[in-house]
Image (cartoon, helix red, strand yellow):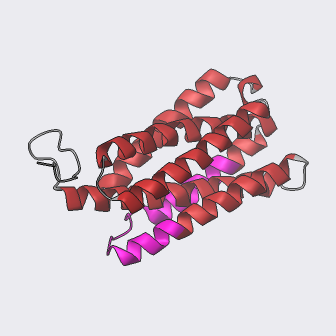
Amino acid sequence: MTAKPSLKRYLPGDPIPADQVKRMVRVDHAGEHGAARIYEGQLAILGKRPVGETIRHMAAQEREHRAEFDRMLVERRVRPTLLGPFWDMAGYALGAATALMGEKAAMACTVAVEEVIDEHYQDQVEALGDAEPELKAVIEKFQADEREHRDTGLAHGAEAAPGYEALSAVIKAGSRLAIWMATRI
């Protein structure tokens, strides 16, 4: 007898599998929107420097990710997070602020965000198991892109940014909070 593929339920009271999938699509859409806005903020400051082309490449991938989750929101009838306008401003502000601190700080921001997103996507892949193969494939493809962005940030000197450890810790904490909030609100 073969087990029916389904999402794992961890605790009594956890959302049913269909609601878990909706939460995944909602939070991933919000995250990809926020990431695109971070890169837009960075480009506003660094776009004319040599690193601008690198940031444009990452921004283009994030826009592709967001477009895919835009499609999924409609197709799966998932409401977007109510915090969208806040993420719009916060993402841009984070990107611009770190870019104003310098190229290495902008790359430190990229590394911190992408490390959290990599963990988040890995948790989703594991939770999905054999369920939702289309969604799982999309998440795995985007996870690979996010890892590439992290590696790009590291290659561009992220760890040499002034106050790297503190900056990274603050951005990671904010990213984790954003994930938690977008999943629920």
Foreground residue among 136 and 167: 136
Task: Name the residue rendered at 62%, 29% in the picture.
Answer: 167
Which residue is painted at 30% across and 44% down in the image? 127
Q: Nearer the viewer, residue 49 or 120?
A: 120
Q: Magenta region's main secondary structure?
A: helix
Q: Position of residue 103 (x, y in %)?
A: 80, 39
Number of numbered labels in the structure image: 0
- Residue 44 image point, x, y percent: 78, 57
Please say if 32 is above or below 69. above
Q: Which residues are magenta?
A: 68-95
From this viewpoint, is residue 46 visible?
no
Q: Is residue 144 left or right of residue 23?
A: right
Q: Is residue 63 left or right of residue 121?
A: right
Snapshot quadrant of residue 146:
top right
The answer to whether residue 93 is magenta is yes
Q: Position of residue 49 (x, y in %)?
A: 90, 49
**Quadrant, the C terminus:** bottom left
Q: Residue at x 66, y 58 (%)?
A: 61
Q: Out of 71 and 167, give the one closest to the viewer.
A: 71
Residue lying at 46% horizontally and 55% vertically, measured from the top left: 137
Q: Is residue 147 magenta?
A: no
Looking at the image, the residue that sits furthest to the front is: 1
Q: Is residue 130 visible?
A: yes
Taking depth in this image into account, of 87 and 29 the one nearest to the observer is: 29
Q: Is residue 82 left or right of residue 137?
A: left
Task: Please determine whether, in this image, residue 168 is positioned above or below residue 123.
Answer: above
Rendering coords of residue 68 (x, y %): 51, 68
